[in-house]
Image (cartoon, helix red, strand yellow):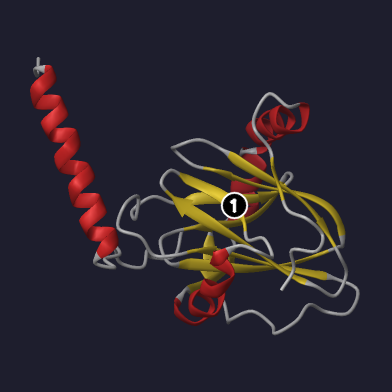
Amino acid sequence: MKSIKTLKKTSILVSTFAAAALLCGCAGPTSRTSKYMSAAVTPPASPPPGKALVCIHRPKALLESKMYTAIWDSTNLIADLGNGHSVAYVCEPGQHYFMNLSADWPACVQAPLLPDKTYDLWIDNMPIRIKPVQKSDAMQQQIAEWTKKDRWVAPGSTAEGYEQRKQEIIRKVLGEFISGKRHLQYMAAEDHR
């Protein structure tokens, strides 16, 4: 069994390496497209008339770069995002719950979407969790870079089977967010581009 001193030294070493990598701008490689996804073109400049467009970005990062996270709109699978991936999701305006499931823990954003507007969400990699990009958020400045550099994906032919297999757990976890058992994040209708 390792001593407490050894564990502390290891922890300090890992933290120092992670901080150095982040300061140097190091990022892991762009992940291969998930087996549930296929390549997609970059998103439209604006949503179709009367619809909302939600772009979800997972910027490249060094940590957690080999893991994927499934992104959901309530019980509908949007994408399985890897490192350096983005997805464009066209949907009806109104109340939505955008959630991710990953090995770390789930996260959920409640978003009342307006018609004819584009919204952005991003995946933080420490831990892997979905977050809103709010109007006043400094992350707004990163959207153009993510749009240009990320690999854009869309659900592939095997996505529907995966979506069906995960329904029980998705309903359970979503219910925990809506009931207040888990911390729900919020995006305002005005947080569009």
x%, y% of residue 86? 54, 68
Q: Can residue 65 be seen in this view?
A: yes
Q: Is residue 21 left or right of residue 142?
A: left
Residue 22 falls in image quadrant: bottom left
Q: Which residue is drawn at 9% across and 19% down?
A: 2
Q: Describe residue 149's horizontal placement relative to residue 167 as left or right.
A: left
**Amino acid beneath label 1:** Lys
User: In the picture shown, does residue 119 fall above or below 101?
Assistant: below
Residue sitting at x 11%, y 32%:
9
Q: Is residue 62 above or below residue 167?
A: below
Q: Name the residue located 13 percent from the left edge and 34 percent from the top edge.
A: 10
Looking at the picture, how far across and down is residue 120, in whole percent? 65, 65
Q: What residue would you read off at disc 1?
A: 131
Q: On the rendered image, what quadrant is the C terminus found in? A: bottom right
Which quadrant is the N terminus positioned in? top left
Residues packed near mark 1 inside 10 Å, few (<14), some (14 to 19) or many (20 plus): many
Q: Can residue 39 be seen in this view?
A: no
Between residues 68 and 165, which one lies in front from this camera angle?
Answer: 68
Q: Is residue 39 above or below residue 125?
A: below
Q: Looking at the picture, how far across and down is residue 75, in whole percent? A: 73, 44
Residue found farthest to the front: 136
